[in-house]
């Protein structure tokens, strides 16, 4: 009987749907959190239902994936995402890398009846920027309806770069963020107003931080060990960036510098936190409070259950205005949600695969049926040992057969979905893109008056905001040689950005020149407007962007 029991347990395991997770990205809109993840087995971008409320519903169906037509996500791509709601539905703006290692933005619209995402267009955003590392992480912030997106990535040499999109311009390269070294490709970001913080693993002891200040330069720091010297910025050569190891007053727990993802949050008290999965598979939190970084106390194992993979993927949905904070990662084969709303961590939950409230009747019926079956079993003393063995064998073989059928059905559905995507791409089906499209353009329409923290009176039809590219190009990246040998990007007579060889270490490997010719287009009307008040003075005692 022991062998039969073991065989039965194996057959049950075959039926269980364990999540095979690559990158995870999450965001918060007025209805609550949403997330996407790439399935390592299928390569599809799976998602929580877009018509959920407060808690994501994650169907147990690997074939339910976001549709792509012109630029298919490559396997092992990083993911970044933001989202909002308007008066009609929910929207998601997701970023990934295609098989040409270009960064692509897909704008998804929610079908409120089914909870499925509809692809309204895909747009290459990295054209003309320094070449993206094939293994780069991606991280994005949506600053608001006027200031748009800022997207961060690593280049071939490991330097951190920024591209952006505003309502006044299309996608543009905004320049170098950090030339400091990095020990893995992970990138995490958070912001309040235009005060942006970007973090990366620096080495096996430290995390690197880049912050945008009002002088339009990125100011660099590290923790636990601070950088030697002072006032390091994005124009400082990497050879002049080194932590002062003797000044570290704490150590990062279970940190090796190889984490594949960093999750960054900010609360209403302006405390910034960095979350990562350590080598011990546990969640760890390091925070900056009163301008000093420190390790925060680890919460209970029920609130932060162990992850399946050391240094694995983790996503975060954070709403500054109401202190909402959710972490998403894989534990025991399932996607779990760790809830830290209001600064208090409750027990983590495995994401529901369906809306339980809509299936309450069937659940009750099933429970009654189980009770009845157990009662009948208790009175089955007349069954012989041979009959019991026969039943056990029959059930086991039946379960194995069902499992085999399930695998076959899944494979056929997955193959058909891939064929449909291939045919759609070849035949030009799906959302039509204008020639040379490099940004979402007029897809962003309507008044985002139901977005978290949005103003009651909505937004002007044609927002009047600063030209993000000009601000960065003329002030932070003016065409002149830097004090430490770095040559800034220069704008040619045709308006193209030219990245020539530099005297500094940044271009030591002689990257080829890259050009960007800004594409003007119809202005979009609206983006979401996450309302985040200006921060206090930050590290280095520089006044930050208001």
Image: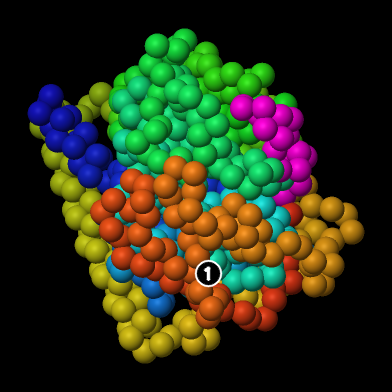
Instruction: Specify whether 9 is left or right of 462.
Output: left
* Displayed quadrant of residue 284: top left
* Residue numbers of the magenta segment: 530-546
**x then y, percent, for residue 351:** 49, 41
Q: Residue at the spot x=44%, y=55% of the render?
A: 487
Which residue is label 1 attached to?
Answer: 491
For this rendering, which residue is in front, 453 or 176? 176
Residue 308 to residue 153: above or below: above
Q: Residue at the spot x=40%, y=32% of the render?
A: 241
**Farthest residue toward the right?**
457
Q: How is the image coloured?
A: rainbow
Residue 352 to residue 40: above or below: above
Q: Does 233 appear in magenta?
A: no
Asked whether residue 363 appears in the rendered view, the answer is no
**x then y, percent, for residue 462:** 80, 72
The mark tally for this picture is 1
| Quadrant into which the C terminus falls | top right
**x then y, percent, for residue 386:** 10, 32
- Dominant secondary structure (helix, strand or loop) of the stretch shown in magenta: loop
| Quadrant into which the N terminus falls | top left
Residue 203 to residue 472: above or below: above
Q: Residue at the spot x=41%, y=87% of the render?
A: 428
Instruction: Specify whether 485 is left or right of 34.
Output: left
Q: Residue at the spot x=35%, y=36% of the render?
A: 239
For this rendering, which residue is in front, 204 or 470? 470
For this rendering, which residue is in front, 437 or 355? 437
Where disc 1 sits, the SS reads strand
Q: Residues within 10 Å of mark 1 (few under 14, many from 20)?
A: some
**x then y, percent, for residue 270:** 69, 29
Asked whether residue 451 appears in the rendered view, the answer is yes
Q: Does 539 appear in magenta?
A: yes
């Amino acid at each position: 009987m022991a062998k039969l029991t073991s065989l039965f347990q194996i057959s049950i395991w075959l039926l269980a749907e364990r999540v095979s997770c690559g990158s995870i990205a999450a965001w918060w809109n007025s209805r609550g959190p949403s997330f996407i993840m790439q399935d390592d087995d299928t390569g599809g971008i799976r998602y929580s239902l877009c018509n959920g409320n407060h808690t994501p519903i994650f169907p147990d169906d690997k074939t339910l994936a976001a549709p792509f037509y012109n630029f298919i996500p490559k396997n092992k791509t990083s993911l970044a995402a933001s989202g909002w709601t308007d008066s009609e539905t929910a929207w998601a703006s997701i970023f990934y890398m295609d098989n040409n290692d270009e960064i692509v933005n897909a704008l998804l619209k929610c079908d409120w009846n089914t909870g499925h995402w509809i692809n309204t267009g895909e747009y290459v955003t990295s054209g003309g920027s320094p070449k993206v590392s094939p293994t780069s992480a991606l991280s994005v912030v949506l600053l608001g309806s006027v200031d748009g997106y800022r997207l961060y990535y690593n280049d071939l040499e490991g330097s951190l770069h920024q591209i952006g999109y505003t309502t006044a311009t299309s996608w543009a390269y905004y320049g170098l963020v950090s030339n400091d070294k990095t020990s893995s490709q992970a990138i995490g970001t958070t912001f309040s107003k235009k005060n942006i913080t970007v973090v990366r693993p620096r080495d096996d002891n430290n995390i690197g931080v880049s912050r945008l200040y009002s002088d339009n330069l990125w100011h660099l720091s590290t923790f636990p060990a601070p950088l030697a010297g002072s006032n390091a910025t994005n124009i400082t050569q990497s050879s002049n960036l080194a932590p002062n190891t003797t000044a570290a007053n704490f150590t990062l727990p279970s940190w090796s510098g190889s984490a594949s993802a960093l999750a960054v949050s900010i609360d209403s008290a302006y405390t910034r936190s960095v979350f990562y999965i350590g080598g011990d598979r546990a969640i760890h939190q390091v925070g900056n409070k009163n301008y000093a970084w420190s390790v925060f106390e680890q919460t209970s194992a029920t609130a932060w259950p162990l992850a399946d993979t050391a240094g694995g993927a983790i996503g975060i949905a954070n709403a500054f205005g109401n202190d909402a904070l959710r972490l998403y990662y894989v534990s025991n084969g399932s996607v779990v949600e760790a809830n830290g709303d209001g600064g208090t961590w409750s027990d983590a939950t495995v994401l529901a695969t369906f809306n339980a409230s809509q299936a309450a009747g069937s659940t009750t019926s099933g429970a009654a049926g189980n009770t009845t079956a157990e009662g009948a079993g208790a009175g089955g003393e007349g069954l012989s040992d041979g009959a019991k063995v026969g039943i056990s064998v029959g059930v086991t073989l039946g379960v194995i057969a069902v499992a085999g059928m399930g695998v076959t059905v899944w494979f056929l559905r997955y193959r058909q979905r891939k064929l449909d995507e291939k045919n759609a791409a070849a035949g030009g089906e799906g959302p039509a893109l204008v020639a040379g499209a490099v940004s979402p353009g007029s897809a962003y329409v309507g008044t985002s008056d139901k977005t978290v923290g949005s103003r009651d009176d909505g937004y002007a039809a044609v927002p009047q905001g600063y030209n993000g590219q000009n601000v960065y190009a003329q002030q932070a990246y003016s065409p002149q040689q830097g004090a430490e040998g770095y040559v800034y990007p220069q704008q040619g007579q045709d308006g193209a950005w030219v990245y020539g060889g530099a005297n500094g270490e940044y271009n030591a490997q002689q990257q080829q020149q890259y050009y960007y010719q800004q594409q003007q287009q119809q202005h979009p009307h609206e983006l979401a407007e996450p309302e985040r008040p200006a921060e206090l003075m930050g590290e280095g005692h520089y006044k930050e962007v208001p």
